[in-house]
Amino acid sequence: KPGLSYASQGSGSQFSVTTEKPGLSYASQGSGSQFSVTTEKPGLSYASQGSGSQFSVTPLGLAVQHRSPAVVTRLLEARPDVNRPSDADAEPPLLLALKSRSEPALDAIVEALVAAGADWTVRASTGHTALHHAAAGGHTKWVAAALKAGIDPNTKSNDGTTPLQSAQRGQNGYRAVPLLLEAGAKIEDAPKD
């Protein structure tokens, strides 16, 4: 199918994604800003008009951020680098997906990314891992998967935060605490800001 569209309206915003071979494009309108991406291959650049900002992002990263399993699946057919950082914060799509609240789209997106070769051990530029984000969100299914993939339950981000500390800070992170403790997470004081 040489085209797929996704549209979502809410809070005065409109988003649409259209993919066609050989090019891919993404456009979003809302809150007085216009955003567009056009690439010959999945994942080159993102330009923002209206706010005057420009930064690097991939179409896959945008689809993950907008919680669209259908668009993620379609983009994965083009076999992009699923571990490529997707935004100015240098987070790969798997980490972006795990930052979301629990919702039906989360599992479908993470499953698609993992099936496409997403690496559980890739870190964001902040040093956070998939385990940090899964723990903060209380996503127990994905905490278990990250631990099974070999992420140390005591790994630290650049600022010294452990997955257990991320779980303590997250709204639903309490769900992940028993899994982390069972895996050997150490109880430590939070890093000082």
Image: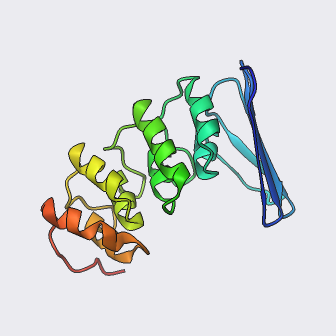
Q: In the image, is residue 184 above or below residue 114?
A: below
Kindly tell me whether residue 79 is visible in this rendering. Answer: yes
Q: In the image, is residue 90 above or below residue 156?
A: above
Identified at 83% across, 64% down, the residue is: 12
Q: In the image, is residue 163 above or below residue 165?
A: above
Most extreme residue toward the right is: 32
State the image coordinates of residue 46 (x, y, percent, origin top left).
Answer: 70, 43
Most extreme residue toward the front is: 104
Q: Nearer the viewer, residue 149 or 192?
A: 149
Q: 125 left or right of 150?
A: right
Q: Nearer the viewer, residue 147 or 106?
A: 106
Q: Quadrant of the C terminus?
A: bottom left
Identified at 29% across, 47% down, the residue is: 145
Identified at 52% across, 58% down, the residue is: 103
Q: In the image, is residue 138 above or below residue 192?
A: above
State the image coordinates of residue 59 (x, y, percent, origin top left).
Answer: 64, 38
Kindly tell me whether residue 150 is visible in this rendering. Answer: no
Q: Nearer the viewer, residue 96 or 138?
A: 138
Q: 149 left or right of 86?
A: left
State the image coordinates of residue 117 (x, y, percent, origin top left).
Answer: 40, 31
Identified at 51% across, 43% down, the residue is: 109
Q: 104 left or right of 185?
A: right
